[in-house]
Amino acid sequence: MSDQKIKNMIRGAIRRSWTYYDAVRKKAIEEATVRIPIKNAKGDNSGRFSEFVRCAHCQELFRKSEIDVDHKVPVGKGFGWPPGDDLLDWVKRLFVTEHEVLQCLCSDCHRVKTKEERQRGKRKPSDGL
């Protein structure tokens, strides 16, 4: 097995564990949550609410299951495991302790942002940004 394959396996396992890093993720979701009153058949407020999360990019409302919590600033220097990127520093950037560095994005916006970050990471410094 190549060194790159091993690094990718370790990187993937660490990233998956971040998915369960709930304390900070929950706070980011809580701050982006919008409560909308549910009306009864007469059109009056029923006292109940539906909760939606606002996407930081498109500003649309989504169910919590449709939202991804994303780092505002990419964790890695580009995509992958770049040479010279210290593993411990990378893990510290991944496991943030302040929810302010996170944002809630709908799946579509998150996919676009990730694709753009990957493209930037593949460019050589001489390619420009």
Image (cartoon, rainbow, N blue to C red):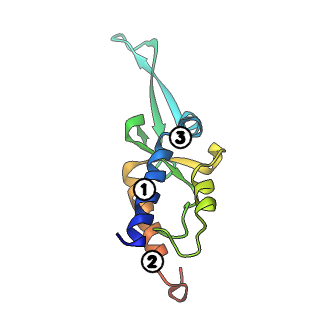
Distance from label 2 to label 1 (Cα)? 19 Å
Q: Are marks 1 and 3 in contact (CB under 8 Å)?
A: no
Mark 3, secondary structure of its residue = loop
Residue labelled with disc 2 = 122
Residue labelled with disc 3 = 21
Distance from label 1 to label 3 (Cα)? 15 Å
Q: Are marks 2 and 1 in contact (CB under 8 Å)?
A: no
Tell me the mark number nearer the camera, choosing from 1 and 3: 1
Residue labelled with disc 1 = 12
Query: With respect to residue 36, does 101 lie above or below?
Result: below
Residue at horizontal 55 percent and vertical 85 percent from the top: 125
Q: Are marks 2 and 3 in contact (CB under 8 Å)?
A: no
Query: With respect to residue 110, does 77 lie above or below?
Result: below
N-term-proximal mark, 2 vs 3: 3
Residue at horizontal 41 percent and vertical 71 percent from the top: 4
Residue at horizontal 43 percent and vertical 73 percent from the top: 119
Res. 66 image quadrant: top left
Res. 84 image quadrant: bottom right
Q: Where residue 43 sits: x, y (%)?
A: 38, 14
